[in-house]
Amino acid sequence: MGSGKGNSLRTRALNKIHLFRGTANRAAFRDSQVSPASVNTDRTYQPNVEMLSGLDASQQHAIQHLWELCGQVEPSVATDRKAETRAMLLSRIAQEKHVPKGADRSALRLVRRTSVVRTAAYRTVSLAAALVIAVALIVFSGGERYRVAPGSEANLIHLDDGTSVLLSPGSRLTVGNSFGKDDRVVRLRGEAFFNVAKGPLPFSVKTADATTTVLGTSFNVRSWPGSLSDMTHIVVETGRVSVAVDDLQAIVEPGQALTVSPKALTPVETDPQERLAWRSGGFSYDNELIGTILEDVERRFGISVKAPASIRLRPVTIHRKEVSDASEFIGDIAATISVRYRTTANGLEMYLD
């Protein structure tokens, strides 16, 4: 993450916390958009009442405890690597023998299990910002919500029932409070590969236009409402899945794919390894609209890729097992359909001669 984004993140965190008694370290404000001269050095940062509203007493206790742990982390070196920052926070949590008696453990569990928080440096305020994000997830999700920012790496999430989910960049997965107790239902916006643990309850993935249900299998679900190709698409690697849309229902076998349609549900043969190249950092498309491909590139690399409708609505077939450079991949597509491309301030652009 660039320094500008890091500063913005820290500034948003400052807007969410309250100044009161204690001692603050001026180093926490280094490189911030807040001038150190404007900060009273006889004060420190704590969660304010508004931020904790909506939580019961035990949850507030847990959040306050975790907040205090953040303040005990001493910054030593700046970094742009979110994994190291998260590991630093979790190592501090691990030193605690137990959560305070009577406290809700959900706050600590959520931070341990979520790997999508991005931060710019080992700064107390940066860690506080990560905690603000975790608190918002607890307060507003009605369970747990996982998000992967565009331009990030895919994130592997482990659910309480033993199911693992590989969530692609730009995607969001919501797990309700009843998961593992009364049901095993999750909601997906984006794309994810599920390796479902066997269990007595069916596992269901709800998207904008379909419900995919299994007992234990591995499969991929793609659903981007509002995108150029917004229909739910399912690819099954092992086991069998049931797909339901209103009164329609279909069984998808291993090595088959299905694109949801309100008129018919028809599985077709496919190669899961090739079709799911995104899991290893690649792209794979058969007769797909270029506009859909560009949307995937934007989510994967966190950039803007512009093109006129005359290019976006062209179909193309292209397969790449691994793509590490967006410009090179867009260049391959441009060469395939004999158009040109160039670098822009925010990313790339494809255009006609």
Image (cartoon, rainbow, N blue to C red):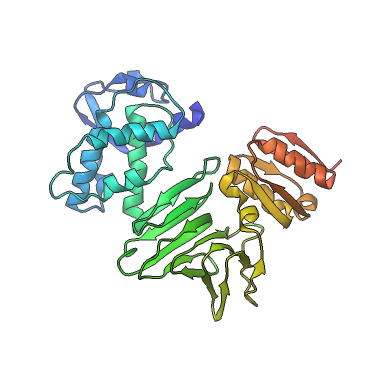
Q: Quadrant of residue 29?
A: top left
Residue 283 placement (x, y as % from top left): 65, 48
Q: Is residue 41 left or right of residue 101?
A: right
Q: Residue at x 38, y 45 (%)?
A: 114
Q: Residue at x 27, y 51 (%)?
A: 106
Q: Quadrant of residue 61?
A: top left
Q: Which residue is most to the bottom?
A: 247
Q: Which residue is most to the left?
A: 101
Q: Is residue 272 above or below residue 19?
A: below
Q: Is residue 183 left or right of residue 193?
A: left
Number of marks in picture: 0
Q: Is residue 43 above or below residue 185?
A: above
Q: Is residue 329 above or below residue 167?
A: above
Q: Is residue 269 left or right of residue 125?
A: right
Q: Is residue 241 above or below residue 102?
A: below
Q: Is residue 13 visible?
A: yes
Residue 215 placement (x, y as % from top left): 43, 69
Q: Which residue is most to the right?
A: 353
Residue situated in front as seen by the camera: 132 or 293? 293
Q: Is residue 14 visible?
A: no
Residue situated in front as seen by the camera: 289 or 343? 289
Residue situated in front as seen by the camera: 306 or 14? 306
Q: Residue at x 54, y 78 (%)?
A: 246
Residue 174 placement (x, y as % from top left): 42, 57
Q: Quadrant of the C terminus?
A: top right
